Image (spheres, grey):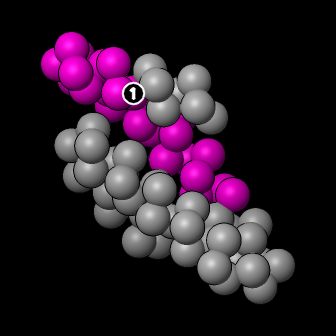
């Protein structure tokens, strides 16, 4: 995941909005899936950590649709 995070940071810094949105969509989905798995295993602290990462990525990419998905 660190490669996606690094790519997202570079895209945001370079004002490459469409690329940042694409990367954020992938990263948000990955974080969501991990969070859901932890939630199902009742490891709520870890689930919360990944839901927060999901939200952070969506906000950094300024993607309101993905930001909303983080709350589902």
Nearest the viewer among 24 and 60 is 60
Find numbered disc 1 in the image and state the secondary structure of the residue it sits on: helix
User: What residue is rendered at 53% in x and 27% in y?
Assistant: 4
- Give the side of residue 65 with respect to residue 5, left or right: left
Span of residues in magenta: 8-34
Where 60 falls versus 47 (above or below)?
A: above
Residue 24 can be seen, yes or no: yes
Judge whether residue 14 is colored magenta. Answer: yes
Residue 63 can be seen, yes or no: no
- Give the side of residue 15 with respect to residue 29, left or right: left
Q: Quadrant of residue 62?
A: top left
Nearest the viewer among 42 and 67 is 42
- Give the side of residue 42 with respect to residue 32, left or right: right
Taken as a whole, is the magenta stretch helix, strand or loop? helix
User: What residue is rendered at 45% in x and 38% in y?
Assistant: 25
Q: Quadrant of the N terminus?
A: top right
User: What residue is rendered at 21% in x and 14% in y?
Assistant: 14
* Outermost residue, left side: 15
Instruction: Give residue 61's position: percent from left, percent from top.
Output: 27, 38
Instruction: Give residue 29's position: percent from left, percent from top.
Output: 56, 47
Instruction: Give residue 41's position: percent from left, percent from top.
Output: 82, 79
């Amino acid at each position: 995941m660190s490669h996606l995070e690094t790519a997202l940071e570079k895209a945001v810094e370079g004002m490459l909005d469409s690329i940042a949105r694409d990367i954020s969509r992938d990263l948000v989905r990955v974080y969501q899936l991990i969070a859901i798995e932890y939630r199902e295993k009742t490891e709520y602290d870890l689930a919360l950590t990944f839901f927060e990462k999901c939200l952070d990525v969506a906000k950094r990419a300024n993607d309101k649709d993905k930001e909303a998905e983080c709350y589902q």
